Image (cartoon, rainbow, N blue to C red):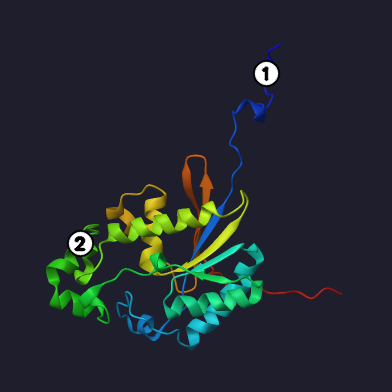
Amino acid sequence: MPHHRVAGECPDRTAGQWSRGVSRRIVLWRHGRTEWNAAGRFQGQTDVDLDDVGRQQAREAAARLASLEPQLLISSDLKRTRDTTAILAAVVGTEIEFDVRLRETYAGEWQGCTAAQIAERWPDEYKAWRAGDPLLRVGGGETRQEVADRMVVAVTDAAKRLPDDGLAVLTSHGGAARLGIAALIGMPLNLFTNIGGLSNCSWSMLREGDDGWILVEHNAGTLPTPVYIEEG
């Protein structure tokens, strides 16, 4: 006999009227600060180390991210991301995997230059880059479209390995992470700068839904250090 729903009664989950409840989550975590970050130099894929501030940022962020109990830790293979992830791995006791698809944009001749130097030497390209052109070869290197495409595949591959309620931390880079987020949530890449920049060692969280990925947190980790109150 068919069930007639009474007014105000919740729909039957078994009737397929509700979401299947998958809540896989991906945290995209930016590495800690480097000397080039502090100097405003375009890093790209140049393998720059964390500075002392960056290592401290990683320690503080790791203490917060550990509470999420990640099942997977996957890092770009560059030093600044490897070393950032190693601090979290030491807290949660999880092995690190490395994925070159999580690297920052390869920016060719722009790597090592400041924004002012790029604007002076390559004014037309810099203007197109600032305007968000997704097909510009940045410094003769990668396009934003290429970076977004590889980030989407890296996130999708990681998510497939998680249980329905699982969480993975993927340590990447500021530009690559934002491009990945834009592509995953269906934002046109020429508008990706409408997603604010990620601070060093801050993160964004995406949750997988029935209709795609949802951005549920962005640039988290920048709140003041919590005050711990002793009991008794």
Q: Residue at x 65, y 75 (%)?
A: 91
Going from the N terminus, do you reach mark 2 or mark 1 first? 1
Give the mark count.
2
- The image quadrant that residue 119 belongs to is bottom left
The quadrant of the rendering that contains the C terminus is: bottom right
Q: Nearer the viewer, mark 2 or mark 1?
A: 2
| Image coords of residue 222 (percent x, y) | 52, 70
Q: Amino acid at mark 2?
A: Leu
Q: Which residue is mark 1?
A: 5
Q: Residue at x 22, y 60 (%)?
A: 131
| Image coords of residue 109 (percent x, y) | 20, 77
Q: Tell me if I can see residue 225 in this picture.
A: no
The quadrant of the rendering that contains the N terminus is: top right
Q: Tell me if I can see residue 190 in this picture.
A: yes
- Whole-angstrom CA distance, mark 2 to mark 1, is 56 Å
* SS category of the residue bearing label 1: loop
Q: Residue furthest bottom?
A: 52
Q: Residue at x 38, y 83 (%)?
A: 48
Q: Which residue is mark 2?
A: 136
Q: Amino acid at mark 1?
A: Arg
The reply to whether callout 2 and callout 1 are in contact (CB within 8 Å) is: no
Q: Is residue 86 above or below residue 144?
A: below
Instruction: Name the residue nearer the viewer: 182 or 104.
Output: 104
